[in-house]
Amino acid sequence: MSNIFGFNNIFNYIWLIPIVFSIHELEEWNILKWYKRYYKNIPESTNTSIRIHIITFCVLSFILTTIAFLMRNTFVLSLIVAFVSAFIYFNVIQHIIWTVQLKAYSVGLLTGIVSIIIVAYVNYSFIVNNLINSVFYIIFILTVIPIIKTFKVNGEMSPEIKKVHEFFIRIEKQIRK
């Protein structure tokens, strides 16, 4: 397989996943205005609580990637790469569906599409080089059913997404104490 990114070691491809995910998340830095425009029932999210959420997700993606990189010859690599990749795929699907449903750009769509292409290439590279067990993808595909509920907008934030927002609102309040 050709090495289009110029890495000497294929395991270094793994770093592309949190990098493109973080770029995608940073596109959502000012998403609160978008939420307020398209949702009626949003919690008392603030720019700060959303930014804590974004930074937390970015940091977690790098922590998980570091663990996978250090444990690259174990099932942990497969588990983490499949989990983070599935999370990214589902998130991008959300953005595509929201854009179609709302007939308006969903903040994060552009970087999401770029992310999904790069993440798919990294996963493909790992699979064809027998570095990752594809069984883990089947496990994460089974999680699609509960995630599908988060795709519909209809002016209402899904309970799952609302809980994430409420969690980071509580975190912000704790930080401000």
Image: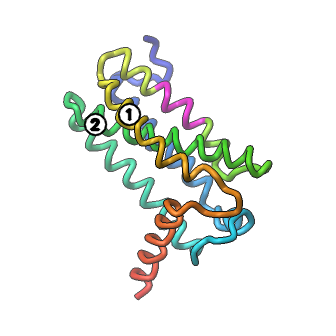
The residue at 26%/43% (across/down) is 67
Residue 5 belongs to the span the image colors magenta: no
Q: Residues within 10 Å of mark 1 (few under 14, many from 20)?
A: many
Q: Earlier in the sequence, mark 2 or mark 1?
A: 1
- In this picture, is 119 found above or below 148? above
Q: Amino acid at mark 2?
A: Phe
Residue in the foreground of this view, choosing between 6 and 141: 141
The residue at 37%/53% (across/down) is 60
| Quadrant in the picture for residue 78 | top left
| Quadrant in the picture for residue 123 | top left
Where disc 2 sits, the SS reads helix
Q: Amino acid at mark 1?
A: Ile
According to the picture, the residue beneath numbered tag 2 turns out to be 69
Tag 2 and tag 1, C-beta contact below 8 Å: yes
Q: Relative to 5, is 46 on the left or the right?
A: right
The residue at 64%/71% (across/down) is 41
Q: Residues within 10 Å of mark 2 (few under 14, many from 20)?
A: many
Residue in the foreground of this view, choosing between 36 and 55: 36
State the separation of the CA atoms marked 2 and 1: 7 Å
Q: What span is in magenta?
A: 114-121
According to the picture, the residue beneath numbered tag 1 turns out to be 14
Rendered location of residue 174, percent (x, y): 39, 82
* Main SS of residues in magenta: helix
Where disc 1 sits, the SS reads helix
The residue at 74%/48% (across/down) is 101
Rendered location of residue 20, percent (x, y): 51, 41
Residue 120 belongs to the span the image colors magenta: yes
**Quadrant placement of the N terminus:** top left
